[in-house]
Image: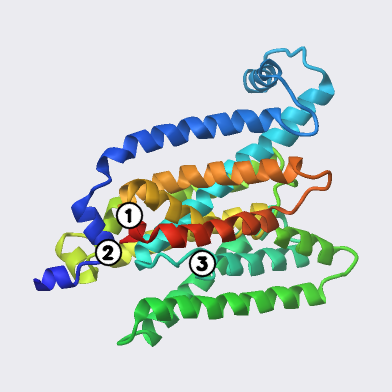
Amino acid sequence: MSAGTERETPAAAGVAADPWRRSRWPVVTILSVALVVAVAVSFAVGVTSYPPATIVEVLVAHLTGRPSTVPRVDDVTIWLVRMPRIVAAVLVGGALAAAGAAYQALFRNPMVSPDLLGASGGAGVGAALGILLSWSSAGVQLSAFVLGLGAVLVTYAVGTVVGRGHESTLTLVLTGIVVSSLCSALISLTKYVADPDDKLPQITFWLLGGLDTVTVRGLVPVLVPVLIGLVPLMVLRWRLNVLAFGDEEAASLGVNPRVVKGFVIVGATLMTAASVSAAGMVGWVGLVIPHAARMLVGPDARRALPVSALLGAIFLLVVDDLVRTLLTTEVPLGILTALVGAPFFLLLLARGRRAWT
């Protein structure tokens, strides 16, 4: 076995063999169609069901300014209630899954996720602090982003220093657990000092996760950061494959590891922070969905990233449909993603080891 082969990572081996190349476009096409169908079904189902013609008429009327014959109450339900919620579910699910796939490819560890690296916890501390101090929506989102990025940088810096000469990936994961625990303690402190009649319920319900408070105007602070974070990840996704060979090999191939890592960390954290500030703590999406994507198209980041984004959007959209239709009282989104995600992850662990190797 050559030296180069000995240092070859599982992800790199998967890229080199590339047994999944032919599965790319059929999978992307099927998932794209499935997402469109899921969006259409999401508009139709709920306390009140609507036929496709009514939904199309409302959407066309608001997008083009044409007059509508749909009753006012149905127009408000479709445009002001369901539309922002459906768009937010697609954005948040796709962003969390793509961020998880990027983190896992960057750190070459399938157990890494925005939750485990502290991004969600740090963003949660920032958002809880913003709610406690009665900041504006923009202030809450900025605070979530800054503290989410800070938590990831602390995890990465401490994990790199402590893990030098040891099992670095294991040290990184353990450091992420410590930082996440610290963030949980800070969130608990924020709740402890919050006004029990006003701020505490806001923080508590926000931490449970949910999309019921998203408005049409509230979509902009989610859409812009998600696009700003997602575009560089998609552009740089092939460089993630090069980084799998190691920093020295990547530099010899003309890739600057520091620049690529910086763009990927900032982009993934920006998407995570925007998602957390809009939907609260929605766990498991960034960990489970990238595993499912790799089972479909292999470990190559060029395919795994877009497929993860599509799968994440479909997953959270379906879960949110269950949240608002399963029971008469709406179940918090974060609870249902955990109930669905944890067993699904155990199933993937039992069947999907070959997906990473």
| Cα distance between the residues tagged 1 and 2 | 9 Å
| Cα distance between the residues tagged 2 and 3 | 28 Å
| Cα distance between the residues tagged 1 and 3 | 26 Å
Specify whether 36 is left or right of 137.
Answer: left
Q: The N terminus is located in which quarter?
A: bottom left
Residue 116 rendering spot, x and y as whole percentages: 52, 69
Q: Is residue 28 above or below residue 67?
A: below
Type of the residue with mark 2? Pro
Type of the residue with mark 1? Pro
Query: Residue 10 has which mark?
Result: 2
Residue 240 rendering spot, x and y as whole percentages: 30, 58
Query: Residue 149 has which mark?
Result: 3
Type of the residue with mark 3? Leu
Tell me which residue sits at (73%, 23%) in the image.
Answer: 50
The residue to which callout 1 is attached is 299
Tell me which residue sits at (61%, 78%) in the image.
Answer: 181
Q: State if disc 2 and disc 1 touch (CB < 8 Å).
A: yes
Residue at the far right: name it.
Answer: 197
Specify whether 264 is left or right of 64.
Answer: left
User: Does dot 3 land on a helix, a strand or a loop?
Assistant: helix
Residue 153 rendering spot, x and y as whole percentages: 46, 73
User: Does dot 1 land on a helix, a strand or a loop?
Assistant: loop
| In front of the other: 46 or 101 | 46
Is residue 266 visible in the rendered structure shown here?
no
Q: Is residue 321 above or below residue 283?
A: above
| In front of the other: 153 or 308 | 308
Q: The C terminus is located in which quarter?
A: bottom left
Mark 1 or mark 2: which comes first in sequence? 2
Mark 1 or mark 3: which comes first in sequence? 3
Tell me which residue sits at (55%, 41%) in the image.
Answer: 314
Residue 300 rendering spot, x and y as whole percentages: 30, 52
